[in-house]
Amino acid sequence: MATKKGSKGTIRGRARASLPDSYKEAPRHAKRGGKTSPDERVEITIRLRRKPGAGEPKAGSKPLTRDQFSEAYGADPADLEKIEDFADESQLEILETSLAQRSVRLAGTVAAMQAAFGVRFKAYRSTLSKLSFRGRTGAISVPKDLLPIIEGVFGLDNRPQARPHFHFAKGNGGRRPRAAALADAGRPMTPPEVAALYEFPPDMLGAGQCIAILELGGGYRSKDLTAYFKALKIKKPKVTAVSVAGGHNEPDGPTSDANGEVMLDIEVAGAVAPGAKMAVYFAPNTDEGFLAALNAAVHDNVRKPSVVSISWGAAEANWTAQAMRDFDTACADAAAMGVTVTVAAGDHGAPDTDDGSVKRARADFPASSPNVLACGGTRLVGGANGIASETVWNNRDGWATGGGVSEFFPLPAYQKSVGVPKSINPGGKVGRGVPDICGNADGQTGYLVRVDGRTVPIGGTSAVAPLWAGLIAALNSGRSQPIGFVTPKLYALGRTAQALRDITVGDNGVNTVKGYNAKAGWDPCTGLGSPRGGALAAAL
């Protein structure tokens, strides 16, 4: 991803410089939608470097506590003071500061933000969602003396950043699946049925654990959760909504089309780990909101999640480099504190989009972060004696598991011996391979969940992230310390452990992008395979 620089100049007499990797293109599928009022209120987040000499945290044999992490790898108070002085000079209000998250949240008018960060805002309206938003093009600039301490500035542009990776199965809303699609006896299942096929340990229920779930829209209704778990004859887990950066649990709000995502996440994770508590972090669907939700969960010293489930994402090309680096850094923070981060790999195959004009294979982010457990999708069919068949999820209608090779992150050490191929794009190089593992995702064999008063089948790799999050929480409940950064441990197990079921049939080609093929061993469709819960518990 090329780095483009904006102009240098001075504001209020201070020399300025462009913030590396902050360049943004004009938004796709959007038109100019009027003017941005100079008096409109804008809230942003500045992320700072770690304190000098701290180095980068690494996942060790013994996780750091959140307090230990903040002390060792947080921001330098002197750097925070410099940002506070800059805010005062720029007529910006300080909303919140955090040494642990290395963040300062600021608010001010459009006019003040434009002057402070050398940007010009334009109003846009999406031609797809019809939503209006504030956009910018070019790079962000900051006073030159602050450049060494600032890693990123987020929220100036509030275009939608990610999409939920869930899929309503055909047959919902009066439509029935094609007869050919049901030839293998595939059918939607409850999460406990899926867990049973995957041999999840029935005596490990996640007691004493907290699962964090990140949501960028939608909401849940407690009465739906009560009815759902009552029907499953499972005690409803404790669910807490946590507001981040102005996001809220809004099942009747403007983003209610994401309710299916929220309910899928809670009900799948809650059904396979009913002893765990659920903390749902609601944030706006912007780069700032997404990053704020992740940091809020990872550094939450009250609920102390041991697992974070993320079912939202977008192709790497849709992110700035500063956003991917900061998000990945937050995931590395989680690993150092023994927190597992599970992430959906996407629902539109190798191109990672339903836009037919895209002709390249693209990995989804944050699944492509090397510090997460990236979750691909399969079509799972049960039989009288367990799993009858399991293949790569690809409905041949644009819906298929994401997966591929990162064009941003290099190949991590734990993948160097598994045969990650070159990207199928022209001149493709070997980078981080996605996904790491997989699970049931085809909507036709997916999950029966309750949404807005109805029980419906839903699939997507969105279901796989909370499925694995629930499994990790369940396994954590039987350990003296959490599994933590599980990804390299899974690669180290090898086939002799029989902890993962290798998926060797199918591909994730969509539209004119041929995609990748499944094969024996790791592949860019289903990773190392789907879980064998009991064997995995023993192996770990």
Image: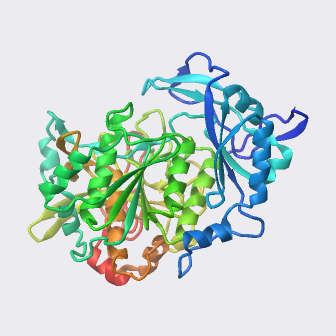
Q: Position of residue 468 (x, y in %)?
A: 35, 64
Task: Indicate how the structure is coloured in the image.
Answer: rainbow
- Residue at 36% of width from left, 38% of height from top? 250
- Residue at 54% of width from left, 27% of height from top? 133
Q: Position of residue 214 (x, y in %)?
A: 43, 51
Q: Position of residue 387 (x, y in %)?
A: 18, 67
Please indicate whether residue 362 sits to the left or right of residue 451 in the image: right
Q: Residue furthest left?
A: 384
293 w.r.t. 67: above or below: above
- Residue at 69% of width from left, 42% of height from top? 22
- Residue at 37% of width from left, 75% of height from top? 476
Q: Position of residue 43 (x, y in %)?
A: 61, 37
Please indicate whether residue 529 sits to the left or right of residue 162 in the image: left
379 w.r.t. 109: above or below: below
Instruction: Report which quarter residue 235 is drawn in.
Output: bottom left
Front-most of residues 446 and 448:
448
Instruction: Report which quarter residue 163 is drawn in.
Output: top left
Instruction: Report which quarter residue 26 is drawn in.
Output: top right
Tell me if residue 128 can be seen: yes
In the rendered view of the protein, which quadrant contains the C terminus? bottom left
Front-most of residues 330 and 247:
247
The total of numbered circles placed on residues is 0
371 w.r.t. 448: above or below: below
Q: Residue furthest right?
A: 13
Tell me if residue 498 can be seen: no
Please indicate whether residue 376 sits to the left or right of residue 29 in the image: left
Front-most of residues 347 and 478:
478
Please indicate whether residue 3 sits to the left or right of residue 373 in the image: right
